[in-house]
Each structure stands twice: as structure tokens, then as C-alpha cells.
Image: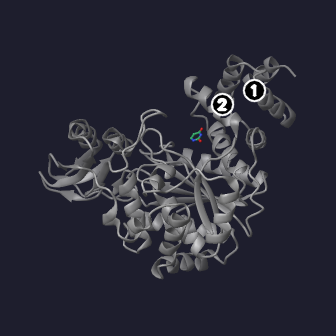
């Protein structure tokens, strides 16, 4: 097999065989196939696409390029959840304890944030003492004992994806649906859970801006999961408005705790409940309606919050901040952003809200940037709300008051206003299963 022939085949719209894909991925990871040939193939894929079978074979080859985590030492069905990333998305912190409180194991590896979106591991590390670099034996022990553990990625998961993603990033080949689906799912397959619930975000703060593209990405990922023998479901959720009101690490943990106390914002509560119910359903805990009731009860009974406290304690964190969120360190400086006009908020450029938060120190501009856990934004008004001129629409938090000018500029531009009332679109937009796309 010559890489030249594979590039030519794909350029002409041909279909790569399973063997060709496996040999190509192995050769690329080993360094036998140079970046310039892989770049040409990636570009051909961008133009010609891949069939569902090719995409699944590519994903499985990428997953197998490194460690495949074997979760069998953990008893019972293990369910994973993945979000394609958004602004203010702290759902893992809410869902993982709910699902564990209902008796289903959650052994979750999460990532750090980059750019305008945050990462679950950074949020967890905002809890004083919280350890996220945990070896496999301890990880398995925690999940068996408590029912849930969320840790940073250990081992060498999907190295083919790391190498390919770095190449895609500099060759304008990131925005191909089969390549994105293979990239995300290769890491999920390598992480070893039995079932996967995907939260595919759509809108101005998401990777996919249009609903049709989000549904297509979801369809691809569900098809890959099913090819690999994992029950997989995707929910398409709105990311045209930040999720919840808090953006930034400590602020988001506080909002997740409020949600587990039953006092969370309506949008975050709704998305968390639908994702948790689907996880419980895949773990065969009952009908989807029964699973939703179970998830709601885990919140109202306080069992889910108790699970979070248990997980924090066993991972070395100080649970006093969970029981009393005023104990979280707070930013030394605060600044109120005021509406420059009167009217209904018609639009929030959600990516820009994330960038404003990053500029305050809450996120990473590059992989090496450090994070200020206390920094971020508390939104006071969101799309659809009516404001008068001079009314506070957001509060900025930072450790250096010189950061406010730029953040205010970015955030003010992110809001648009209208004289007429604005109807926001529903939060839950579609559900994709192996044989059905259901638009809500
Ligand atoms: N996230 C990933 O992990 N991979 C992509 O290709 C895009 C988003």
C-alpha cells in the first residue's frame, strides 16, 4: 500500500478499505507517513467526505493507536457523557453525581479548557485540594466505592488523534464532520465506557453553528458508537446563549452546586436532567420517563449533592466549599457592565462571552496559559430579557482591575438589542439515536 494511492483514491471520491485505514493510521503514528502526505489526504477527506463505514473504521483505528482503558474492574454498566463544548457548560458537575446517586457508575475522564470554552478538570481544580491526576487503580477504587470519579486523562489515549488534530489545526482541515466525529469518538471509545450520551451543542458559542450540521455531526458520532458496539445517543442543545449565568471556574462550580441543591437556573437544570435521564436509560434503569423522575428525585432528596461531596472528599478536595459556597476564594475586583441602550436583548454572541471571560483570566489563550479560578463573569441579563439604559447586565470578576476595560468592550459588543420582544429558541432541539432523528 502506498500513501500516494490512498490520497489519489480519496481525491477521486473513492472509499478507503478498513485495512487501508488501519495501515495508514499505524504508519502515521509511527512516523513512516510524513505530515505532507497526511495533510493531502485530510484535505481530500474535507472535499470528498467519508462513508459511515469509513468514518467508523478510522475512529476505531485512531482509538486503538494508544491505550484502550479496560473498565471491567468496575462493576456494572459504565456510562460516559461528552459535550462538544460551549460557554458556561458545567453539566458534568451536575450530571455525574445525579447518575451515581441513582446507582449507575460514572468513570469519567475529562479535559482542560482552551480558548472560549472551559474544561471540567479546570473547574474541579477550583475546589481547594481537589486531585484530578489519579492513577488507574485509585480511579477504579473510587468509582467502585463512591460510584463516580471525574479525573484528567491518564495514559496515552488516542495518540493518533493528538497528532492528526495538531496537523488539522494548521492545514485548515478541522471543519470536516467525519474528521470531527472520528476525533471526538476515538477518545470516547478509548476511555472504555459501555454506553455514551453526547451533548452536541449548536449555535454561536459552539463548534457547530447550524442545527443541520449539528444533527449531521451527531448522526455520525452515534453511528460510530453503534459500529463499535456501544449504545450511543446524542441530544442537540442550544448554545446561542451561555448555559446558566456563571462563566469561569469557581463561579461555575458554585452554579453547579446550586443546581444540585434544586436552586439552579432553569436552562442548566433542564439540560442536566435530560442528559442524566438518557444516561440512566442507556444503563437500563427504566423507561426514559422513569429515569427522568429518578434524576429529579436525586436532586430533591439531596442524594446527588451528597455524591458530589463524597467524590470531592475522596479525591482530596475540601468539601466545606461545597456545603457553604461562600467559602470559595473570590476575585479581589468586581466591575459592573451596564446596558448602553434600552430594549430587549435580541442576541448574545456566546463565543465572545467566552472570550471576554478568558480575557479576565478564566480561560487559556494557549495550552500553556495559567488559569485564575476566581475570574469570570456573572451574567445578570440574557437573551429575551428587557433592560433599561444603565441597568447592570453582567458583573466581571478578576484579580487585576486593568483587565476590565478590554473584557467590557468584548462583552458589550456581544449583546444586541431590539425594540420588540424576542422569542428565544427551545433549549432542547433534537435527539439522535441509531435509527432516528427526532427534532423537538
Ligand atoms: N473536538 C475534538 O476533540 N476534535 C475535533 O476535531 C473537534 C472538537
- At horizontal 49% and vertical 61% (from top left) the residue drawn is 93
Instruction: Single out the residue that lies furthest toward the left.
Output: 390
- At horizontal 36% and vertical 41% (from top left) the residue drawn is 358
**SS class of the residue under badge 2?**
helix
Q: Quadrant of ligand 1?
A: top right
Label 1 CB sits under 8 Å from any ligand 1 atom: no
Count up the numbered dots: 2
Q: Nearer the viewer, residue 380 or 417?
A: 380
- At horizontal 84% and vertical 19% (from top left) the residue drawn is 2
> Which circle's residue, 2 or 1, is located before the other in the chain?
1
For residue 304, side relative to residue 247 (left or right): right
Q: Position of residue 133 (x, y in %)?
A: 58, 50
Q: Are marks 2 and 1 in contact (CB under 8 Å)?
A: yes
For residue 407, side relative to residue 354 (left or right): left
The residue singled out by tag 1 in the image is 28
Q: Is residue 359 above or below residue 346?
A: above
Its colouring scheme is: one colour
Q: Nearer the viewer, residue 315 or 106?
A: 315
Q: Is residue 119 above or below residue 413?
A: below
Q: Position of residue 161 (x, y in %)?
A: 67, 36
Q: Position of residue 278 (x, y in %)?
A: 61, 67
For residue 71, side relative to residue 383 (left or right): right
Q: Nearer the viewer, residue 321 or 89?
A: 321
- At horizontal 36% and vertical 52% (from top left) the residue drawn is 247
Q: Is residue 59 above or below residue 292?
A: above
- The local crowd at label 1, few if under 14, some if 14 to 19, many if 20 or more residues have their Cα within 10 Å, is some
Say whether residue 232 is visible: no
Q: Position of residue 281 (x, y in %)?
A: 65, 71
Label for residue 16?
Answer: none
**SS class of the residue under badge 1?**
helix
- The local crowd at label 2, few if under 14, some if 14 to 19, many if 20 or more residues have their Cα within 10 Å, is many
The residue singled out by tag 2 in the image is 164
Amino acid at each position: 500500500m502506498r500513501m500516494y494511492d490512498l490520497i489519489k483514491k480519496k481525491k477521486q471520491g473513492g472509499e478507503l478499505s478498513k485495512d487501508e485505514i488501519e495501515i495508514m493510521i499505524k504508519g502515521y503514528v509511527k512516523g513512516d507517513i510524513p505530515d505532507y502526505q497526511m495533510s493531502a489526504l485530510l484535505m481530500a477527506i474535507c472535499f470528498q467526505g467519508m462513508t459511515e463505514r469509513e468514518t467508523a473504521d478510522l475512529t476505531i483505528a485512531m482509538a486503538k493507536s494508544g491505550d484502550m482503558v479496560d473498565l471491567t474492574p468496575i462493576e456494572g454498566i459504565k456510562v460516559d457523557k461528552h459535550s462538544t463544548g460551549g460557554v458556561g457548560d458545567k453539566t458534568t458537575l451536575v450530571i455525574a453525581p445525579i447518575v451515581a446517586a441513582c446507582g449507575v457508575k460514572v468513570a469519567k475522564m475529562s479535559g482542560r479548557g482552551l480558548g472560549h470554552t472551559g474544561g471540567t478538570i479546570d473547574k474541579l481544580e477550583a475546589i481547594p485540594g481537589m486531585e484530578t491526576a489519579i492513577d488507574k487503580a485509585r480511579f477504579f477504587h473510587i468509582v467502585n466505592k463512591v460510584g463516580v470519579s471525574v479525573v484528567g486523562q491518564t495514559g496515552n489515549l488516542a495518540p493518533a488523534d493528538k497528532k492528526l488534530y495538531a496537523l488539522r489545526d494548521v492545514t485548515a482541515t478541522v471543519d470536516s464532520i467525519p474528521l470531527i466525529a472520528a476525533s471526538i469518538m476515538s477518545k470516547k471509545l478509548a476511555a472504555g465506557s459501555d454506553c455514551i450520551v453526547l451533548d452536541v451543542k449548536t449555535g454561536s458559542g459552539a463548534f457547530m453553528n447550524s442545527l443541520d450540521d449539528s444533527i449531521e455531526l451527531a448522526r455520525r458520532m452515534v453511528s460510530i458508537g453503534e459500529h463499535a458496539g456501544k449504545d450511543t445517543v446524542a441530544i442537540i442543545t442550544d448554545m446561542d446563549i451561555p448555559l446558566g449565568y456563571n462563566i469561569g471556574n469557581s463561579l461555575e462550580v458554585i452554579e453547579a452546586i446550586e443546581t444540585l441543591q434544586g436552586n439552579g437556573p432553569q436552562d442548566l437544570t433542564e439540560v442536566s436532567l435530560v442528559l442524566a435521564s438518557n444516561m440512566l436509560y442507556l444503563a437500563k434503569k427504566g423507561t426514559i420517563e422513569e429515569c427522568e423522575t429518578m434524576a429529579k428525585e436525586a436532586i430533591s432528596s439531596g442524594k446527588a449533592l451528597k455524591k458530589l461531596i463524597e467524590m470531592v472528599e475522596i479525591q482530596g478536595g475540601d468539601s466545606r466549599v461545597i456545603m457553604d459556597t461562600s467559602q470559595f476564594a473570590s476575585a479581589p475586583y468586581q466591575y459592573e457592565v451596564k446596558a448602553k441602550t434600552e430594549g430587549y436583548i435580541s442576541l448574545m454572541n456566546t463565543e465572545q462571552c467566552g472570550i471576554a471571560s478568558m480575557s479576565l483570566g478564566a480561560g487559556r489563550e494557549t495550552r500553556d496559559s495559567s488559569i485564575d479560578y476566581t475570574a469570570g463573569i456573572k451574567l445578570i441579563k440574557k437573551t429575551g430579557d428587557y433592560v433599561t439604559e444603565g441597568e447592570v447586565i453582567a458583573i466581571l470578576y478578576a484579580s487585576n482591575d486593568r483587565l476590565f476595560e478590554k473584557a467590557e468592550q468584548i462583552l458589550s459588543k456581544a449583546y444586541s438589542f431590539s425594540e420588540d420582544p424576542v422569542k428565544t429558541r427551545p433549549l432542547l432541539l433534537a435527539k439522535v439515536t441509531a435509527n432516528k432523528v427526532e427534532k423537538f
